Amino acid sequence: MGISESPMFVPGVWGPYYSAMVPGFWLNEGGQSATGKLIDHVVRGHEAFPELQTKAKARGQNIYTYLNNHLDQMKKPGPVGLLAADLHVWPDFHGNRSPLADLTMKGMIVGLTLSKGLDDLAMLYLATVQGIALGTRHILETMQTAGHHISTLFLCGGLSKNPLFVQLHADITGMPVVLSKEVESVLVGAAILGACASGDFTSIQEAMKKMSKVGKIILPNHQDKRLYDKKYQVFLKLAEHQREYKAIMAAI
């Protein structure tokens, strides 16, 4: 997640590693485990999932395109994120990888009701994606506190194809998100290494400049800053409270 010319240690973030990704640069690596699986788990485990499947199929859409459109229809004046203003998710269902490095952490959902319809599923999906983006902000702020200077996010992989996921990362971190023109970035990376190995380029940096292109740049909606600053406060409290609950139960 962080690449720089000089080494810098951040607790809960792996590294620094020299020349691990780009020759001559130091790398600090932090991330969350199984975020795509988490979203799938939450959506598919909801009682309204069969209804979602049926309606998405009828429109010829995948389930996440349908959910994103459904949220747009549900939203009132203001950002779509307000729909989950009272629904909060701590996304570490599989332990915290960064920045807490605590495998004992569990997932948390605060704000559940007796509702079990498609609207409820859409809001839970929204809150889950928000929770993942808030986790990204948590990692970034930990790195920045240690002295890193991060101003831009670069997203690749399957979740970068989800417009809601991308926009929420921009909005919640307050940073622009850069998407690659070529969606399959792993394949591009392999091609870059192959081109260097074959002697077509003199360095990885040269190959990167020639073979990788910017697709879209997604800018944050700064008018949503107050909403997500508040949600981030709750997000940090969720971790704090979970550790308090563990301490209480450890006294058994």
Image (spheres, helix red, strand yellow):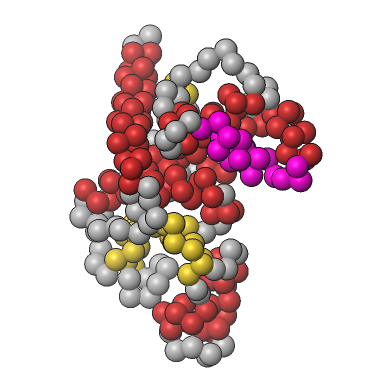
Spot occupied by residue 116 in the image (x, y as percentages of width and height)? 63, 18
Q: Is residue 239 above or below residue 5?
A: above
* Magenta stretch, main secondary structure class: helix
On the question of residue 245 being in view, the answer is yes
Residue visible at 56% across and 88% down in the picture: 198
- Is 245 contained in the magenta span? no
Residue visible at 76% across and 46% down in the picture: 60
Left or right for 242, reference 62: left
Q: Is residue 170 above or below residue 109?
A: below
Spot occupied by residue 134 in the image (x, y as percentages of width and height)? 39, 39
For the N terminus, the quadrant is bottom left
Left or right for 195, reference 146: right
Spot occupied by residue 197 in the image (x, y as percentages of width and height)? 54, 84
Magenta stretch, residue numbers: 59-75
- Of 152 and 22, nearer the camera is 152
Q: Is residue 30 above or below residue 190?
A: above
For the C terminus, the quadrant is top left
The answer to which image quadrant residue 71 occupies is top right
